Amino acid sequence: MATILDLHSPSVFIGKQGNGVISFGSGQPDLPPPREAVEDIDIRKDLRYGLIQGEPALREKLSKEYPNSTADNFVITNGASEALDLVFRSISPGKVLVPRPYYYSYPPIIKLAGMEPVYTDLVGGRIDIDDFKKKVKGCKAVLINSPSNPTGCVEAIETLKEIEKVTADLGVYVISDEVYKDLIYERENYYIKGEHVITVNSFSKTYAMCGVRVGYLWSSDQRVADDVIKIKTHTSMNTNLVGQDMALRAMSVPRSYIRDQQEIWRRRRDFIYKGFRELGFELWRPEGAFYILPRCANAREFVSLLYNEYKVIVYLGEWFGAPDHIRLSYALDMSEIEEGLSRIKDAMKKVRCF
Amino acid sequence: MATILDLHSPSVFIGKQGNGVISFGSGQPDLPPPREAVEDIDIRKDLRYGLIQGEPALREKLSKEYPNSTADNFVITNGASEALDLVFRSISPGKVLVPRPYYYSYPPIIKLAGMEPVYTDLVGGRIDIDDFKKKVKGCKAVLINSPSNPTGCVEAIETLKEIEKVTADLGVYVISDEVYKDLIYERENYYIKGEHVITVNSFSKTYAMCGVRVGYLWSSDQRVADDVIKIKTHTSMNTNLVGQDMALRAMSVPRSYIRDQQEIWRRRRDFIYKGFRELGFELWRPEGAFYILPRCANAREFVSLLYNEYKVIVYLGEWFGAPDHIRLSYALDMSEIEEGLSRIKDAMKKVRCF
């Protein structure tokens, strides 16, 4: 009998790719970055420290994308991860309301900053605004992630507007992690607005450059940037300059690049969603990002079996606050998705999934 | 009368260079990075996430430089700053013993990690081992920085060995910030050794690539790397891949590059040390790094005057835990050092320095 894996965290699957393994684990685009970001880049010869806040040209360019923003409102960070870490450290201590299921790094980031996560459970993949309103009282901040990893769901604009209002009234920060903002299939992204809003974003998903680690935060409240810079001065200093140069170059790609990517993601979404429905799984239809979160009884056994006997990596929903679910990324070639679905179908004969 | 500057921190001088200003402030080499690190670099086209721990090739190469180390013992970080931040977060809470004067980021980094700095005052620029032994009791860690910013002093090997022994006996971590290890004029670097030792280092100073933000930590205790990786997985993920590629390339420069740099620093050291002595200042003769810390009465007034009327930036010793001192970096061209000294000589007529 195959060994049951010690499924403590996604790190159990690190380095397990290749060799015929099909991985639905990874939360990053498999597509290449745009040519503009990687070709004919002259590495600058002056590699002295840059501004802690980030390169002026990059912040200037970003300010054109965000309504009513100025370059001063942005801080360039080592990916969205560092932006979140810095924001929480700058507003600590206090409670942070987090919709559940959540991106698996959220609870540890919040706790590492000396804050306490509290949860509001999604209903049908969406924020339950009544529960949200109840739980938000007494919180210092809420963390919104729309489109969401791991649900693939996009919150309704009315919900986001109601969150803006409730939090503004209570003086609660909204930290809006919008790293999938350019990966929405149904509508344009809606930027959550307000003086108490801190938007966290990244070049990683839009331009397929996760490993370059360039993200940013912005807020119309200048104190947010100022407070974050004070911490970053000591904890990491400027974000790497070559990465910032690449990010600026990536931003010059025509909008059609992003639309073309969306088309690819949409086709994959349709394919995997249909495939899982046909296998009998209950799941939400993703409207953004590139994840599905099917309900699955015996998830732990099934995840172990899939890896051990079928060379298929899927993540345990539990890591995302979703027990009895499995979480799959469809950042894979169509042929791999197809092969993966076929192996999953076979595996279902051995473990009862529903 | 000129305004007294609000000298709250070194950030008061950010963006004040150029326009005839001579800055003795900046803690980074003014020399260019080696050609190998910046020329003919093919940016990799696969920019997906790398290992949180860092690129295997870079860690492998580093392990050749450190006696009895393996690639597994290293974690590549966003400069030495992030290495320190991660280490303190991983061992928090507790007290950290810090020799004073100290690098100005040490107290905030320690406090941000939820730890408490306690101090042992240097005597004649050196650790007073008796005071050290008294203060180290009850500490979780000590932070050693030899060669030191801001003193330019290098600890005697006997002192470092005694620190190894005392801390090993007490089970106290030694965090050894050796970012100036290749900038010692008097002897080879002595790596502090032991299972409880965590060495923090960087490519920034050796290869003049501060803005690329690639540093690392290593410890022969594998748990250190493991604990740090767990945190970094959530707070910043892998260190930027292009920077790691550049760091690896930089490591291929011949050892003569480093010796040639040392020669330049030594000449500057001799020049500025002699200059300050001739002006009547009392100061330690730097044995490494590129800083002097002359005693100076009315330091606050003198720093203000120098900037306002003589366009000379020097830092306040107070920021480094050294009141009644000023701190200067000699990462400047000889002609600039000469011009700076001449302006300082003039300014001394207006403010009593001793």
Image: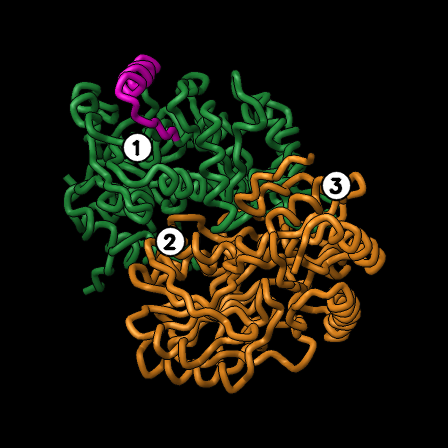
Chain colours: A green, B orange
Mark 2 is on which residue type? Lys
- Residue B73 point in image, percent of width and height: 45, 71
Q: On the image, numbered disc 2 is attached to which residue?
A: B111
- Residue A274 point in image, percent of width and height: 32, 29
- Residue A122 point in image, percent of width and height: 21, 28
Observer-side mark, 1 or 3, equals 3
Count the labels in the image: 3
Q: Which mark is residue A151?
A: 1
For numbered disc 2, what is the local secondary structure? helix
- Quarter of the image that includes the C terminus of chain B: bottom right
Q: As displayed, is residue A242 above or below residue B326?
A: above
Label 2, label 1: how far apart the Cα atoms are: 37 Å
- Of A227 and B48, nearer the camera is A227
Tell me where the magenta segment starts and ends, as one range.
A157-176
Mark 2 nearby-residue class (10 Å; few <14, some 14–19, many ≥20): some
Q: On the image, numbered disc 3 is attached to which residue?
A: B309
Mark 1 is on which residue type? Thr
Mark 3 is on which residue type? Glu
